[in-house]
Amino acid sequence: MRNEQLTRIFLAKLAGTPVFDPNGDRVGKVRDAVATEPSKSANPRIIGFVVQVPQRRRIFIQATRVTSIDDSGLLMTGSLNIRRFQPKHGEVALLEELLDREVLLRKTGEPVIVEDLGIELTSIGDWRLTLAHVKKKERGWRRGLMSTIDWSDVEYESRLVPNPARTSEEISDMSAQDVAAALSELEIDERAELAKSLDDDKLADVLEEMDDADRVELVTNLEEERIADVLGEMAPDDAADVLKEVGSETAEELLNLMEETDAEDVRRLMTYEDYSAGGMMTTDPVILDADATVADALALVRRKELAPAIAAQVFVCRSPLETPTGRLLGIVHLQRLLREQPALRLGLILEPASASLTPETGLNDVVKQLANYNLIALPVVDESDRLIGAVTVDDVLDHLLPENWRNTTESKNRSEVRK
């Protein structure tokens, strides 16, 4: 039996309480409340709640779908949207933004620390941020110097990125390289806040374009659940590169949060040396069996998310068709696919691999093989000729260029623009 509906509740008390669906089944637990920009409103409206569901995924439930809040938890209506929560521009997760943060009393300018935040249900049925429970700072910390005040008496500087040219809507239209360059010019707090507004696919692309040091700094300033989701969207070799940079303890925590199949590929790649074929390869080349048709192959390489170097050839293997595959039979290049009839089977037009690599093949030998055969990708096989990955020319270039080549290029481009 549920308790009486509350009209006022403090968020720190609400956090951790269960969330129930219309059938009374527990679906997760409350983690935060999301409001419109609290620094610009006397009583900002609560637009929804952050809820943690199984596998530590945080999702968003609109406030309009919350039918009641009481001491036993939150009751919602409708079905769950399990898409991971990402605040939009101008939205703030209140506990994340304000809990334990120093703010000022508007009338006196006195600094206080936010201990909790109170929300109230209005007569028209929406929730508003109305109260702040604060601890005063007087001659060092003293016990008992706490009070509950109106939110309108609080003044603080938002940590949201104020630059209107850096909204999530505009960033979605920028290339990953341009976003990475823009992030490099921000302080880490602004960088992390802006990164939160990007969807997982976009942030994955951006991380691949960032300088190593900037990437580590950003990754360590975002929630682990978010980074685990983003790593799952990255090419396994790029995800492995990121995890090698953040330290073994953090890497293991992130791997445990990733989907099992994604984590398995990344773990395997992390066992290889950085400047070896195994350390540079991707485990997701385009793979088909000999009975697949030209039309099947063209449909696969046409996918937008594929890098051009990966889409330039199809590796034909015996089953299974996920790395490590069955024996590698040969390769069909994109140009050959464009010249053949759509119904033709790949087994009739494949070419034997003119060269292949082992995971231990060093960088210099990889470069020589690519140059000798005028290729942009080479298969990496194990001792049984099973395909375990492919090294592309762009992977090789990343390892041949100086470590700070991205920053050097960006600085040069900015200098040329100023001229």
Image (spheres, rainbow, N blue to C red):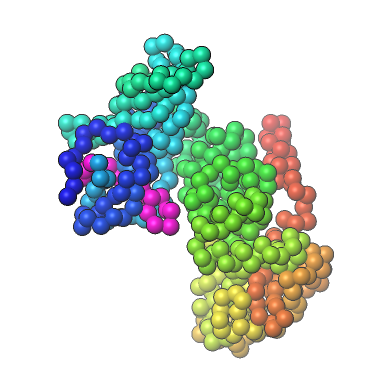
Residue closer to the observer: 371 or 378: 378
| Residue 4 point in image, percent of width and height | 17, 40
Q: Quadrant of residue 34?
A: top left
Is 60 magenta? The answer is yes
Q: Is residue 334 among the parts visible in the rendering?
A: no
User: Looking at the image, is 368 positioned above or below residue 348?
Assistant: above
Picture residue at 32% right of the left edge, 45% below the top: 17
User: Looking at the image, is 245 positioned above or below residue 46?
Assistant: below
Is 363 magenta? The answer is no
Picture residue at 59% right of the left edge, 61% below the top: 235
Residue closer to the observer: 71 or 408: 71
Residue furthest out toward the top: 108
| Number of numbered markers | 0
Instruction: Name the side, left or right, on which 77 lies relative to 381.
Output: left
| Residue 255 point in image, percent of width and height | 56, 58
What is the magenta range? Answer: 51-70
| Residue 269 point in image, percent of width and height | 65, 65
Residue furthest out toward the bottom: 348
Residue closer to the observer: 337 or 370: 370
Instruction: Name the side, left or right, on which 176 lies relative to 272.
Output: left
Instruction: Name the side, left or right, on which 368 lies relative to 36.
Output: right
Q: Main secondary structure of the magenta part?
A: strand
| Residue 205 point in image, percent of width and height | 57, 52
Image quadrant in which the C terminus is located: top right
Picture residue at 62% right of the left edge, 52% below the top: 249
Q: Is residue 52 among the parts visible in the rendering?
A: yes
User: Looking at the image, is 57 positioned above or below residue 102?
Assistant: below
Picture residue at 71% right of the left edge, 42% below the top: 407
